[in-house]
Image (cartoon, helix red, strand yellow):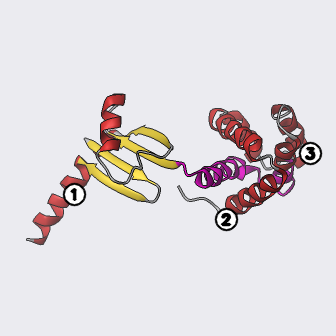
């Protein structure tokens, strides 16, 4: 997923501020809540994306939704809305989470399979590759995409192992076209 420069800049600014004030862990937890809330609420996303609702009303609603958050997080959300970037709120929160996890050395792993697989099979796949540091913490996201037909696609950071049936069939198809 491409992330906008805006999300990266806001996230870096927030990280710099929380590092200086010693509030990184608290804000990290709250940003996870922001991502969760924004992911689960289509209505809230539509509300924030509606251009004819003014920033004052959006700020009031956000203040109610996030009233249990620290002043740092509340002020960030108000600032984002004030500058008309509320459509980037989830991305900014996710970028902040990613930056904190990078500092802590957490690997982000995405495993895509054609069907749902057991935890035992997931662990076997993770052990079978050198991309995954078995001694480090990792954040695993498992996706099901029937379009890959079988096998799996393992993405660790910016590296990928494509062991899907679809990619193997495409390779065979290319080989036949070349000969």
Rendered location of residue 85, percent (x, y) = 77, 55
User: Residue placed at 66% from the left, 40% from the top?
Assistant: 35
Q: Quadrant of residue 119?
A: top left
Mark 2 element type: helix
Callout 1: SS: helix
Precedes in sequence: disc 1 or disc 3:
3
- Viewed as shown, does residue 65 lie left or right of 105? right
Magenta part of the chain: 78-106
Question: Mark 2 against mark 3, which lies toward the viewer?
Answer: 2
Residue at the spot x=85%, y=36% of the render?
61
Question: Could you tell me how far apart the alpha carbons at marks 1 and 3 are, in whole angstroms?
Answer: 53 Å
Horizontal and vertical percent position of residue 41: 67, 33
Q: Nearer the viewer, residue 13 or 46?
A: 13
Pointer 3: what residue?
A: 56
The spot of residue 153 in percent (x, y) is 34, 48
Q: In terms of image quadrants, where is residue 53?
A: top right
Sequence-wise, which precedes: disc 2 or disc 3? 2
Residue at 85% in and 46% down? 72
Q: Quadrant of the C terminus?
A: bottom left
Q: Say which residue label 2 marks.
A: 5
Upstream in the sequence, badge 2 or badge 1?
2
Q: Which mark is residue 170?
A: 1
Residue 154 located left or right of residue 36? left
């Amino acid at each position: 997923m491409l992330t906008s420069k805006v999300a990266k800049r806001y996230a870096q600014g927030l990280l710099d501020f929380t590092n200086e004030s010693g509030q990184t862990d608290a804000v990290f937890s709250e940003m996870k809540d922001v991502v969760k809330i924004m992911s689960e609420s289509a209505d809230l996303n539509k509300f924030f994306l509606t251009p004819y609702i003014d920033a004052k009303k959006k700020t009031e609603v956000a203040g109610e939704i996030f009233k249990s958050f620290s002043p740092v997080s509340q002020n960030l959300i108000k600032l984002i809305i004030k500058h008309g970037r509320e459509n980037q709120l989830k991305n900014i929160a996710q970028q902040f989470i990613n930056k904190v996890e990078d500092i802590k050395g957490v690997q982000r792993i995405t495993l895509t399979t054609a069907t749902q697989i057991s935890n035992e099979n997931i662990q076997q796949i993770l052990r079978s590759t050198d991309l995954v540091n078995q001694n480090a913490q990792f954040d695993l996201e498992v996706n099901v995409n029937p379009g890959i037909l079988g096998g799996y696609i393992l993405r660790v950071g910016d590296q990928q192992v494509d062991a899907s049936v679809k990619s193997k069939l495409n390779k065979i198809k290319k080989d036949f076209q070349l000969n």
